[in-house]
Image (cartoon, rainbow, N blue to C red):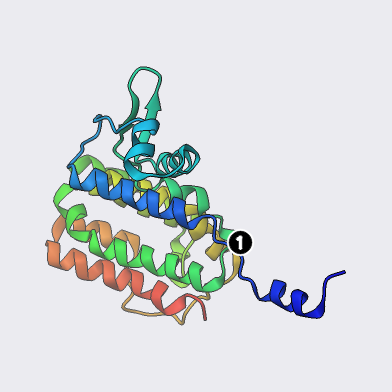
Amino acid sequence: MMSDKNKNNTLNIAAVDSSSLVDKVEQTLIDLLISEELNPGDQIPKELELTEMLGVSRTVIREALNRLKTIGLIESTKRKGSTIKSPDLLFLLKKSLIPNILDSATLKDIFELRLVIEIGMSDLIFRRATPEYIQELEEIVALEPESSKDVLFDIDHEVKFHGKLYQISGNQTLMDFQTILLPAFRYVYDSGLVKSPDHDSKWVSHQDLVKILKEGSPNKFRNAMRKHLDRHFKGYFK
């Protein structure tokens, strides 16, 4: 039977952090990629070589390499072994962004991030809006209900119009980012977390934005985007 003293000693012993060594090896490997200025397609040392270089077990090396594979920094092939890969920057976000298990503070941050991005990409949109793109925007606006100014937004029309703006920006990362965040946007809209603000006579509609895109200047369009999204800033998470 264990004595009280032994029981207390047992309770006071901290658990060993078995992941710390893998963490260190993972960071060491990342540092190695940077210091050696390796590029996509370049090979990295084999598991056995890394074991000898770093003085750790092959199991630790394998776990660290698996982590780098998970975040898309390396890939393994039968002929080449492990090689550097240009990572998909949004891969992990795509895997982890499950709206219904995110707390309201995180959802608020995501919603706010969307507003900031769309204001920031105004110059790209203005420079890259071809007559064909403008016509497509006009077709989207033509299908919107006339009462759209009396509500904060209609989610389907919002997605179509702003999705087209992301496409016009010509920035693939922005387009991918918008696609990934879209479920969170929809969840925020549908959950009632966003409340409709009082009617604002200065509000800029989708139709107004298209007109300014056709006839205005980059500065006018940027300011119009701010005014258009201002209703969202005023309305969210009340």
Residue drawn at (41%, 79%) of the image? 234
Element type where label 1 sits in the image: helix
Between 217 and 190, which is closer to the camera in this rendering? 190
Residue 134 visible to an observer of this rendering: no
139 is higher (above) or lower (below) than 111:
above
Residue drawn at (18%, 54%) of the image? 124
Between 3 and 202, which is closer to the camera in this rendering? 3
In this view, which residue lies farthest toward the top? 79
197 is higher (above) or lower (below) than 82:
below
Dot 1, crowdedness within 10 Å: few (<14), some or many (≥20)?
A: few
158 is higher (above) or lower (below) than 140:
below
Residue 220 visible to an observer of this rendering: yes
Q: How far across and how far down the image is residue 215, in percent?
A: 14, 58
Q: How far across and how far down the image is residue 232, in percent?
A: 41, 72
Residue 68: image quadrant is: top left
Between 38 and 135, which is closer to the camera in this rendering? 38
Q: How far across and how far down the image is residue 110, in percent?
A: 43, 65
Residue drawn at (14%, 51%) of the image? 127
> For this view, does 234 lie left or right of residue 116?
right
- Residue under label 1, please give it: 101
Between 11 and 143, which is closer to the camera in this rendering? 11
- Image label count: 1
Q: Which amino acid does label 1 sit on?
A: Ile
Give the position of the N terminus as an image quadrant. bottom right
> For this view, does 138 lie left or right of residue 1?
left
Q: How far across and how far down the image is residue 67, in percent?
A: 44, 44
